[in-house]
Image (cartoon, rainbow, N blue to C red):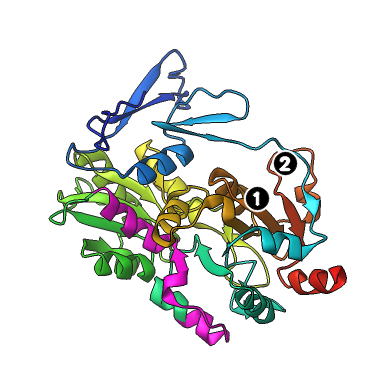
Amino acid sequence: MLTTTSSSTLAQSVTVTCIRHGDGHGHGHGHGHRQWFQPLPVNYRFSDAARNSLLSNSSIFNLNRTPNRNRIGMGTFTTRAAAAAQPLKNADELIDSVETFIFDCDGVIWKGDKLIEGVPETLDMLRSKGKRLVFVTNNSTKSRKQYGKKFETLGLNVSEEEIFASSFAAAAYLKSIDFPKDKKVYVIGEDGILKELELAGFQYLGGPEDGGKKIELKPGFFMEHDENVGAVVVGFDRYFNYYKIQYGTLCIRENPGCLFIATNRDAVTHLTDAQEWAGGGSMVGAISGSTQREPLVVGKPSTFMMDYLANKFGISKSQICMVGDRLDTDILFGQNGGCKTLLVLSGVTTLTMLQSPNNSTQPDFYTNKISDFLSLKAAAV
């Protein structure tokens, strides 16, 4: 049950009902439910966009579902019927129907540190047609400024204002709820999150420097933690260790009102172009497992970033096309936001996966890669 006031102030704790399973020692708990709390102090104020987008995509809320309609806190969104995706045949028609293109990065613009063929020419063509381009990534290892440098290194002219990383989203979310500046944020993640928190004026601890810390489990050992930590932000972390798990767990479980925020729950990521690697969802899953809490997710498919940029640029969501390579994040992100969606097969998703009977997420269109905009455009002339 989610209790809210009629204003934008979330005045009650979020109550989560979880079915408890057996503990493996014959002590079954299936007979009842246990309530866990994601407490939010009364002075934390959600913007409507922040509240509704986060509630729509966090499994901490036990919502009653009706066909094709998902209730979200104080609002609703409609899930499109799963009509089969159509191959993109006329790129001009899609291009002319929207004002803004939102591109995922990994698997769409690049793979690892390698640019995907035809990307510069495609982006130049869209800009020449007066289209606004925005780049949204769930990867939290870099800040917006650092991503700007990566685009530059790859020969792409992209401004910092056009980039929205989940590291930025975490800091923007904390600002949107007026997270107290005298509270601290414990970070399980990399430098990008730290830089965005610093730019937003928040105190933080943790991050890469905790990657080398170890715990000596001697008899009677008691691990101290900072009781002034008011939020734990978890993102992709190549320096993840048991120290971070325990520290984050103590903050979330023992600090009153401590928030558990995830940049994303991606199962895999592209660290190189040779194979898929375990993603940020593995780190989030560890903390969720130890705390028995589900996080507030600020990255895709949560629409927090969609709402943020729509408000920032004054964009109508019906005039946006989301382009991505993942069904469970990119395409859901676009659909949850009421946008057109285009799946590219240059990253995680294959045509077999898209057309599988087990897949219920269908984009409006699909194509091999974004440079098909150029060839399909020529074929249509």
Q: Which residue lies at the image location 37% right of the left edge and 41% below the top edge?
A: 290
For disc 1, the neighbor class at 10 Å (few under 14, some 14 to 19, many from 20) is: many
Residue 161 highlighted magenta (yes or no)? yes
Q: Taking 15 as reference, is 101 left or right?
A: right
Q: Which residue occupies the foreground of this view, 219 or 79?
A: 79
Give amino acid for label 2.
Asn
The quadrant of the image that shows the C terminus is: bottom right
Residue that mark 1 sits on = 327
Q: Position of residue 302 (x, y in %)?
A: 48, 47
Q: Taking 95 as reference, is 176 left or right?
A: left
Secondary structure of the residue carrying numbered label 1: helix
Q: Which residue lies at the image location 32% right of the left edge and 67% below the top edge?
A: 196
Whether label 1 touches label 2, CB < 8 Å: yes
Residue that mark 2 sits on = 359
Q: Which residue occupies the foreground of this view, 362 or 21?
A: 362
Q: Position of residue 220 (x, y in %)?
A: 19, 45
Q: Earlier in the sequence, mark 1 or mark 2?
A: 1
Q: Quadrant of residue 376?
A: bottom right
Q: Is residue 276 above or below residue 129?
A: above
- Magenta residues, start to end: 149-177
Q: Quadrant of residue 188?
A: bottom left
Residue 216 seen by the camera: no
Q: Is residue 370 above or below residue 12?
A: below
Q: Taking 29 as reference, is 228 left or right?
A: left
Give amino acid for label 1.
Leu
Q: Which residue lies at the image location 36% right of the left edge and 22% below the top edge?
A: 34
Residue 11 highlighted magenta (yes or no)? no
